[in-house]
Image (cartoon, coloured by chain):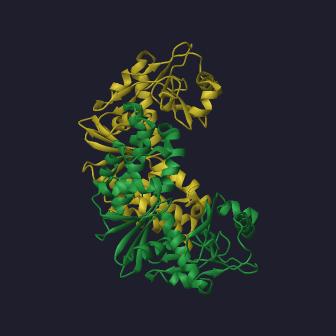
Chain colours: A green, B yellow
């Protein structure tokens, strides 16, 4: 491994900012994580925020930076266009938007859009998707990328043909902290466990066709009538939401699934997919986005490699 | 109509307080509505809050008061017990809890509970339910009571045999004001319309078996890609949630439906039920809760009538 930085890679989302310096082979030399998402960065200025983090890692002034995520949205730094599906993911490599009027070469990767009767957009996940496709040489596959807004992408002969978004993570956060269910979950929102019996029971319930909307209040009632614990309540809410997501996605395809996730997310979704008898392989989400960013950087600045 | 008050009736919920003085026949003599729900009242004291509103209406010191709603919950004034289903609704008339250590005779009507694999509770709606049953002499029926936590009750031979709760209203409020969808709906949350084409299309989509969780983000995407208006976005969100509720309830029964609702709620749910080809008749929600409260008062204090 060399210690000379060739590119800086950044995943810049609504609520978090991540930055890696990598060598010519894509190995990580230095890393920075912060809460400088869109809202925080807009106030300070996107260029200043980025330069501050680069400087903290000792990055040279001429190091090129490739960015994916909501920094490329209308509310972000500059608006990078959307590549419409069906699309070969390599199309995102040539569509990166360059930031003007700054000394450093910074480019933002475009998102994906889906027009028609089921309109949809993604920003950030397209880079994770590209990384996962290249890491596993995928061509006919369903790619599941769980998160605040979970994305499920259909890949046919290597092309992304369509995708769905599930509001699973955002709904979990809202329901556990702001709805009537906050009285049942309290501080246990991060304690949802794939090993809790409530998790598996809820996944099964959603797979059987029940409506999630009609099951949420049962968490509150089970606390009042059956002394359901906060961990049980969190596991049940997690199971209802992830179960509804998987039941919705399961109905749409019989292709094998690649799950792109890390940590607790990988554990919860992995358990849910097993309960649903869906075959899957796992790609680490952080590695996937770094691989996608590195491939994009190598394509834009090949002479650097 | 006499102008002598025989009873005071109160529907005292989490976020709102309503009070009526009625004559011997149940006709309304005076009315008060306020935001003195549970949280506001707990600080000032429940007795002082109630006396303040009674005094503003000129109620005599010995006027008995019957209360339904969350004032009877563990977080309320005193905890009124739950009557377990299956139950004859008249059971709630004899189970009212009397407030101790105050001069005035105040009673709180018990809620309903459902034990077993689908635990559930209600407080306040049981009184509306009783009122609706008596107003229409219902015996085999589904009673739909939309709201923050919509209740659907199965009535067989006049007995409540079971019920479901849908978090429709609470989810609408959270999603329209706090989620990513707030950018699409803005100040138009109260502009959801049963006449907007997005409303009917969303109801149809949910009746076709789609998962609500996978359709919410489409509202955001349709704004970005297709310039969906705030009113359209609000109508679409309303249609997705109400559609999911009705699809869930529709799967469970073929009995006729009595919709207990007022105002905008009656218009939205009425339109949704028509789109779903479900026969229903309408009972005004305010009249139903007053009738239930009046019947309870007449039963507890018959000599007053």
- Picture residue at 50% right of the left edge, 46% below the top: A190
Q: Is residue A194 above or below residue B69?
A: below
Q: Is any part of residue B303 visible from this angle?
A: yes
Q: Which quadrant of the figure has residue A236?
A: top left
Q: Position of residue A283 (x, y in %)?
A: 42, 66
- Picture residue at 44% right of the left edge, 35% below the top: B289
Q: Is residue A175 above or below residue B197?
A: above
> Total label count?
0
Q: Is residue B76 above or below residue B151?
A: above
> Observer-nearest residue: B55 or B217?
B217
Q: Residue furthest bottom?
A: A303
> Observer-nearest residue: A115 or B266?
A115
Q: Quadrant of the C terminus of chain A?
A: bottom right
Q: Position of residue A162 (x, y in %)?
A: 41, 75
Q: Quadrant of the N terminus of chain A?
A: bottom right
- Picture residue at 62% right of the left edge, 33% below the top: B40
- Picture residue at 59% right of the left edge, 19% below the top: B60
Q: Position of residue A60 (x, y in %)?
A: 72, 73
> Observer-nearest residue: B24 or A49?
A49
Q: Position of residue B96 (x, y in %)?
A: 42, 22
Q: Which quadrant of the figure has residue A246?
A: bottom left
Q: Is any part of residue B305 visible from this angle?
A: no
Q: Is residue A3 above or below residue B273?
A: below
A85 lies left or right of B279: right
């Amino acid at each position: 491994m060399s210690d000379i930085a060739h590119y800086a890679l950044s995943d810049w989302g609504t609520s978090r900012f991540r930055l890696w310096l990598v060598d010519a082979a894509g190995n990580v030399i230095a890393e920075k994580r912060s809460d400088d998402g869109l809202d925080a960065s807009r106030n300070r200025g996107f260029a200043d925020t980025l330069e501050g983090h680069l400087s903290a890692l000792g990055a040279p002034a001429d190091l090129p930076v490739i960015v994916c995520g909501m920094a490329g949205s209308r509310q972000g730094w500059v608006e990078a266009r959307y590549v419409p599906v069906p699309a070969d993911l390599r199309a995102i490599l040539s569509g990166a938007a360059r930031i003007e009027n700054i000394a450093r070469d910074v480019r933002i990767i475009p998102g994906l859009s889906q027009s028609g009767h089921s309109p949809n957009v993604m920003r950030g996940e397209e880079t994770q998707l590209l990384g996962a496709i290249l890491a596993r040489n995928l061509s006919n596959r369903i790619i599941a990328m769980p998160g605040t807004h979970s994305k499920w992408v259909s890949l046919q002969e290597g092309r992304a043909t369509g995708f769905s978004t599930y509001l699973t993570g955002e709904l979990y956060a809202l329901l556990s902290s702001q709805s009537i269910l906050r009285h049942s979950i309290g501080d246990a929102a991060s304690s949802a466990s794939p090993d809790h019996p409530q998790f598996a029971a809820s996944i099964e319930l959603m797979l059987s066709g029940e409506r999630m909307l009609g099951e949420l209040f049962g968490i509150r009632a089970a606390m009042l009538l059956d002394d359901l614990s906060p961990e049980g309540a969190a596991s049940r809410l997690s199971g209802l939401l992830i179960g509804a997501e998987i039941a919705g996605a399961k109905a749409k395809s019989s292709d094998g699934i690649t799950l792109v996730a890390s940590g607790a997310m990988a554990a919860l979704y992995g358990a849910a997919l097993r309960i649903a008898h869906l075959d899957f392989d796992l790609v680490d989400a952080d590695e996937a986005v770094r691989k996608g960013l590195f491939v994009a950087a190598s394509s834009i600045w090949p002479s650097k490699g």
